[in-house]
Image (tube, rainbow, N blue to C red):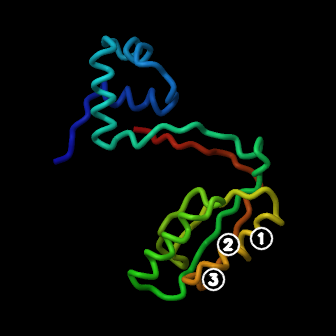
Amino acid sequence: MEEILDQTDLRLLRLLASDAKITTKDLAARVNLSPSPVFERVKRLEAGGFIKGYIALIDPEKLNYGLIVFCNIKLKHHDKSIGHQFVTDIMRLDEVVECYNISGDYDFLLKVYAKDMKHYQDFVFNKLGSVTSIGSTHSTFVMCENKNTYNINF
């Protein structure tokens, strides 16, 4: 059964999405409740899977990972074991920060961070190239990141 969220729950989610470090006391003040019920609501939202976790958003350029690449992957052929093995193999590659199973001309879309073109070339030849289920790849290089947010509007 799907849990129904009230307006306070939704407001808590919006506040946490914009600042995951906000204290329970500050959350409580922003939604006009005392800290104890706010703490319980947040715990319920976490337990219900509405909040998957909390992260720090790191600036990749500050760590010299300024090259963003979207890599389209076409598998050699389609069957359950090949798809599962591909995902298992991709999860081990540190450069891959996002992986989506997609429809259309390609089977998967990867978001990859690399230090530079040489690093990406090494990644393609030595890491991605060792994934035996890949039939072909197509890389698109990001010239400018105009918007990057994990928040959804609800």
> At label 3, which amino acid type do we have?
Ser
Q: Which residue lies under the disc numbered 1?
A: 122
Which callout, 3 or 2, points to the residue nearer the camera?
2
| The quadrant where residue 113 appears | bottom right
* Residue at x 20%, y 46% (from the top left corner): 2
Q: Which residue lies under the disc numbered 3?
A: 136
Asked whether, in this view, residue 51 is left or right of residue 140, the answer is: left
| Residues under numbered marks 3 and 1 in contact, where contact means CB atoms less than 8 Å apart | no
For this rendering, which residue is in front, 96 or 18? 96
Give the answer, above or below, for where 93 lies relative to 150: below
Which callout, 3 or 1, points to the residue nearer the camera?
1
Secondary structure category for the residue under label 1: helix
Secondary structure category for the residue under label 2: helix
Task: Determine crowd level at label 3: few under 14, some 14-19, many 20+ residues with C-alpha closer than 10 A.
Answer: few
| The quadrant where residue 62 appears | top right
Going from N to C along the chain, the mark reached first, 3 or 1, is 1
Q: Which residue lies under the disc numbered 2?
A: 127
- Picture coordinates of residue 92 (x, y %)? 57, 64
Asked whether, in this view, residue 139 is left or right of residue 35, the answer is: right
Q: Residue furthest left?
A: 1
* Residue at x 56%, y 58% (from the top left corner): 98
Give the answer, above or below, for where 78 lies relative to 100: below
| Residues under numbered marks 1 and 2 in contact, where contact means CB atoms less than 8 Å apart | yes
Circle number at residue 153 = none
> At label 2, which amino acid type do we have?
Lys
Task: Determine crowd level at label 1: few under 14, some 14-19, many 20+ residues with C-alpha closer than 10 A.
Answer: few
Give the answer, above or below, for where 96 lies relative to 66: below
For this rendering, which residue is in front, 2 or 95? 95
* Residue at x 54%, y 71% (from the top left corner): 89
- Picture coordinates of residue 124 (x, y %)? 71, 73
> At label 1, which amino acid type do we have?
Asp
* Residue at x 83%, y 66% (from the top left corner): 118
